[in-house]
Image (spheres, rainbow, N blue to C red):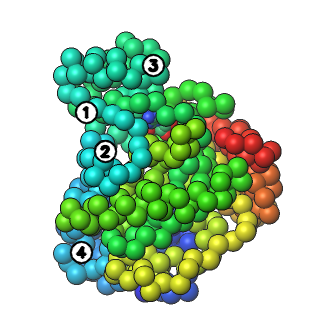
C-alpha cells in the first residue's frame, strides 16, 4: 500500500516511523515533512493547506491512503478534496473538523450528545464577557473560539487579564474552571465504530512544575499508572461514542482521530476540549506502544470497515517523550541553530530511544532548527522510570544552542503519583 502523510511535525514523524515499520506499506511519502521524516519517507514540497494540490499529489503518487496530520488542513477541507478525488483519507471533513475548529460548535455537540463538560457561555460583547466572568468567578477560563495552535486559552485569577484576552479574541467561550489531572484519550473512528487507543498525559506548560506559559505540549507519557483502569471504557461510553453518534445524527459524520482532552475532577470525568487529529506530543508515546500495524487501522477508518478489525494489540512497555524547544518558545522562536548529537542517539540509544523531528530542516550537511518545538525525544522501557531514564539520557546527547526542555516529564507518575 502506498501512503501519503500530510504535515511536518513530530506527530507526523511518529506516524511515518510506525508506517515505515508496517509490512503492508510499500511506499511512504510525506508532504511537506521535515529533515527527520526524510529518513523514512520521500518528501514532497506541497502546501498542506491546499486541498487541490494535496489531492493532485496523492493521485500522482497513486496513494491508497492519505493521512492528514494537523488541524489546519482538516479545518480547511483538505480531507474532503482527497476523498472527492476518490482516494481514501484518514481525517475528518471540514464540517466535522469544526469539533476542533470552533469551541462553540464543540460545546453545542456536547450538549446535544449529553457529554459531560465544563459549563460555559459563548460571548461576543464586553457586557457578555463581564457577566460570564462574574457568573463563574476565579480562576477564569477564557478560550478563543477559533483555532489558535494551543495558545488561545487563558486560565488566570486576574480578572483584568481574563477580560483583556476575551476582548482581544472577539468571540470567546468562557467556562467553569475544571480541577484535577488531565488525560488525553484518542480514538480512531470511521464515523460509526469507535476504537479507543491508550490514554496519555501531556505537559502543556513551558516550565518544570507546570509553570510558565501554555505551549503546544512539552512532553508526554503513557500508560498512566495512577488512572482508574475503567477510565477508557467509561470515556468510550460517556464521551467518545455519544459524540461520534451525535455528529453522524447531524449529517456530518466524523471519521479520523477523535482526541478527547479530559479533566479527571472530583465530580467525574469532564471534556476540556476535542481535537480532530492526533495530539502532539501524545501520539509519540501512544504509537510507541501500539503493536497493531498502523496503516491497516487507519485505512479501515477511512474505508468505514473498523467494525471488522480485530482488537488492537499493545505492548506492555511504557513510553516517555521529551520535547526540545527553541530559544524563546512559545514566543517567537529563534531558528537556524545547528543541531548536533543526533548520530550519538542513533548509535547509543536505539532502538529504546530515538529522536523524532518537528521544526528541523537540512542546511547543507547540517540539520538546523526551523520552528518552536524542534525535536521530540522518545523512549520506551519496562516501566515509566526506565523509559524516562532512557529519554533523558538521549536528550543529554543532543546539542542545540539556547534550547529548552522540561526535566520533570513523567517524574511524578514514575514515582507512583498522579500528575
Ligand atoms: P485547550 O486548548 O482547551 O486544551 O486548553 C489548553 C489548556 O488550558 C488545557 O490543557 C488546560 O490545562 C487548560 N484549560 C482549558 N480549559 C480549562 C478549564 N475549563 N478548567 C481548567 N483548565 C482548563
Ligand atoms: N498536545 C496537545 C495537542 O496536540 O493539542
Of the numbered discs 1 and 2, the one sitting upstream in the chain is: 2
Q: Position of residue 306 (x, y in %)?
A: 42, 80
Image quadrant in which you'd find residue 264:
top right
Which residue position holds label 4? Answer: 83
Query: Observer-nearest residue: 374 or 267?
Result: 267
Which residue position holds label 2? Answer: 107
> Circle 3 sits in a helix, a strand or a loop, which is it?
loop
Image quadrant in which you'd find residue 127:
top left
> Considering only vertical position in the picture, is 204 above or below 97?
above
Of the numbered discs 4 and 1, the one sitting upstream in the chain is: 4
The residue carrying pointer 3 sits among few (fewer than 14), some (14 to 19) or many (20 or more) residues within 10 Å by Cα, namely some
Q: How far apart are labels 1 and 2 at the CA level?
A: 9 Å
> Circle 4 sits in a helix, a strand or a loop, which is it?
helix
Q: Which mark is residue 122?
A: 1
Q: Position of residue 145 (x, y in %)?
A: 28, 38
Of discs 4 and 1, which sits in the foreground?
1
Q: How far apart are labels 2 and 4 at the CA level?
A: 28 Å
Of the numbered discs 1 and 3, the one sitting upstream in the chain is: 1
Q: How far apart are labels 4 and 1 at the CA level?
A: 33 Å
The reply to whether the residue tagged 4 has its Cβ within 8 angstroms of ligand 2 is no
Of discs 2 and 4, which sits in the foreground?
2
Amino acid at each position: 500500500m502506498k501512503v501519503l502523510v500530510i504535515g511536518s511535525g513530530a506527530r507526523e514523524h511518529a506516524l511515518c516511523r510506525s508506517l515505515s515499520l508496517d509490512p503492508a506499506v510499500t511506499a511512504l511519502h510525506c508532504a511537506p515533512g521535515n529533515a527527520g521524516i526524510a529518513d523514512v519517507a520521500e518528501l514532497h514540497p506541497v502546501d498542506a493547506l491546499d486541498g487541490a494540490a494535496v489531492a493532485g499529489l496523492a493521485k500522482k503518487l497513486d496513494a491508497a491512503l492519505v493521512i492528514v496530520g494537523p488541524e489546519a488542513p482538516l479545518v480547511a477541507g483538505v480531507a474532503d478534496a482527497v476523498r472527492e478525488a476518490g482516494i481514501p483519507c484518514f481525517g475528518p471533513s471540514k464540517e466535522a473538523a469544526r469539533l476542533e475548529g470552533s469551541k462553540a460548535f464543540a460545546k453545542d455537540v456536547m450538549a446535544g450528545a449529553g457529554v459531560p463538560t465544563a459549563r460555559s457561555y459563548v460571548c461576543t460583547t464586553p457586557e457578555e464577557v463581564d457577566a460570564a466572568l462574574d457568573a463563574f468567578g476565579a480562576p477564569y477560563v477564557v478560550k478563543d473560539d477559533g483555532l489558535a495552535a494551543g495558545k488561545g486559552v487563558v486560565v488566570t485569577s486576574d480578572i483584568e487579564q481574563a477580560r483583556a484576552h476575551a476582548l482581544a479574541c472577539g468571540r470567546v467561550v468562557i467556562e467553569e474552571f475544571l480541577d484535577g489531572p488531565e488525560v488525553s484519550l484518542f480514538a480512531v473512528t470511521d464515523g460509526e465504530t469507535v476504537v479507543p487507543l491508550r490514554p496519555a498525559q501531556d505537559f502543556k506548560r513551558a516550565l518544570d512544575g507546570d509553570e510558565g506559559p501554555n505551549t503546544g505540549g512539552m512532553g508526554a507519557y503513557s500508560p498512566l499508572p495512577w488512572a482508574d483502569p475503567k477510565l477508557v471504557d467509561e470515556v468510550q461510553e460517556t464521551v467518545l461514542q455519544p459524540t461520534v453518534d451525535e455528529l453522524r445524527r447531524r449529517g456530518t459524520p466524523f471519521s479520523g482521530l477523535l482526541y478527547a482532552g479530559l479533566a479527571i475532577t472530583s465530580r467525574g470525568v469532564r471534556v476540556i476540549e476535542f481535537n480532530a487529529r492526533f495530539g502532539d506530543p501524545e501520539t509519540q508515546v501512544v504509537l510507541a506502544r501500539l503493536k497493531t500495524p498502523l496503516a491497516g487501522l487507519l485505512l479501515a477508518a477511512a474505508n468505514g470497515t473498523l467494525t471488522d478489525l480485530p482488537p488492537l494489540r499493545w505492548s506492555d512497555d511504557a513510553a516517555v517523550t521529551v520535547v526540545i524547544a527553541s530559544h524563546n518558545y512559545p514566543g517567537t522562536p529563534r531558528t537556524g541553530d545547528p543541531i548536533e548529537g543526533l548520530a550519538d542517539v542513533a548509535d547509543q540509544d536505539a532502538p529504546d530511544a530515538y529522536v523524532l523531528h518537528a521544526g528541523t530542516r537540512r542546511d547543507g550537511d547540517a540539520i538546523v532548527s526551523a520552528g518552536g518545538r524542534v525535536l521530540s525525544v522518545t523512549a520506551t522501557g519496562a516501566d515509566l522510570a526506565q523509559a524516562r531514564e532512557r529519554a533523558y539520557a538521549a536528550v543529554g546527547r543532543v546539542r542545540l544552542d539556547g534550547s529548552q526542555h522540561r526535566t520533570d516529564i513523567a517524574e511524578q507518575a514514575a514515582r507512583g503519583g498522579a500528575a
